[in-house]
């Protein structure tokens, strides 16, 4: 409906002075970027504030499309950073090392998980990798955990894997 009205009234819209349109845009932008919104984002933390400010600054310095795209990219970078933090915990108790997946596990967790399996504390007899509470474990992480069994056994421990099914047709590289 709005698009149809714009197309039908294109000649009329072209007669509106640009200064009037700019005034409407500035007024609308002021409403959208009200100081209370900045305070709210500040209270929510840097994960919310930084993408918000980057979006606004980019819109002002470039144009709407580029600013929004840059804001989305920065927001996604913060999402990836958040997904990487606290994805799994390591608990060394007595002779058992437990690696528990707390969130979904992606390829960027693989190196840290393998490092935890490669460097066991002295005296470790058993390693438990528990993905029981994780909804998703990426394929190459699943494969790497199963392939680390020999390395764990070489260190004198046994490996128990919970909630990670073996990968069919593993590449073995």
Image (spheres, rainbow, N blue to C red):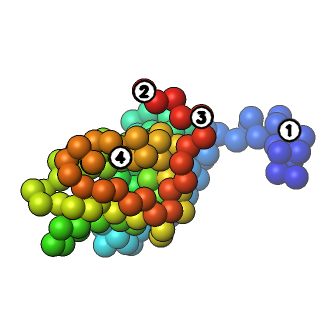
Q: Nearer the viewer, mark 1 or mark 4?
A: 4
Which of discs 4 and 2 lies nearer the camera? The answer is 4
Q: CA distance from mark 2 to mark 3?
A: 12 Å
**Does the CB distance between marks 1 and 3 fall below 8 Å?**
no
Residue on which the image places disc 2: 173
The residue depicted at 50 percent of the width and 62 percent of the height is 163
Disc 3: which residue: 169
Point out the tag, 4 or 3, that comes first from the N-terminus. 4
Q: Is residue 75 visible?
A: no
Q: Which mark is residue 149?
A: 4
Question: How many angstroms separate mark 1 from mark 3 (CA)?
Answer: 57 Å
| Real-space Cα separation, disc 4 to disc 3, in angstroms | 17 Å
In-image side of 109 versus 13 (left or right): left
Across and down, in percent, residue 152 comes to 27, 48
Establish if 147 lies above or below 159.
above
- Tell me: residue 17, above or below residue 91: above
Between 43 and 38, which is closer to the camera in this rendering? 43
Tell which of 84 and 3 is nearer to you. Answer: 84
**CA distance separating discs 1 and 4:** 66 Å
Q: Nearer the viewer, residue 85 or 116?
A: 116
């Amino acid at each position: 409906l709005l698009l149809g009205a714009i197309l039908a009234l294109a000649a009329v819209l072209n007669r509106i002075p640009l200064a009037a349109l700019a005034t409407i845009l500035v007024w609308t932008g002021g409403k959208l970027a009200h100081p209370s919104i900045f305070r709210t984002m500040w209270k929510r933390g840097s994960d919310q504030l930084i993408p918000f400010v980057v979006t606004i600054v980019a819109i002002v310095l470039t144009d709407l499309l580029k600013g929004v795209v840059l804001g989305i990219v920065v927001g996604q970078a913060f999402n990836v950073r958040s997904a990487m933090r606290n994805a799994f915990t390591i608990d060394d108790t007595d002779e058992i090392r437990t690696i528990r997946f707390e969130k979904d596990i992606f390829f960027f967790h693989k190196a840290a998980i393998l490092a935890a399996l490669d460097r066991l504390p002295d005296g470790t007899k058993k390693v438990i990798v528990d993905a029981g509470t994780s909804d998703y474990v990426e394929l190459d992480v699943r494969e790497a955990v199963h392939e680390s069994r020999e390395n764990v056994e070489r260190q004198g421990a046994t490996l128990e894997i919970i909630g990670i099914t073996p990968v069919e047709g593993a590449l073995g590289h």
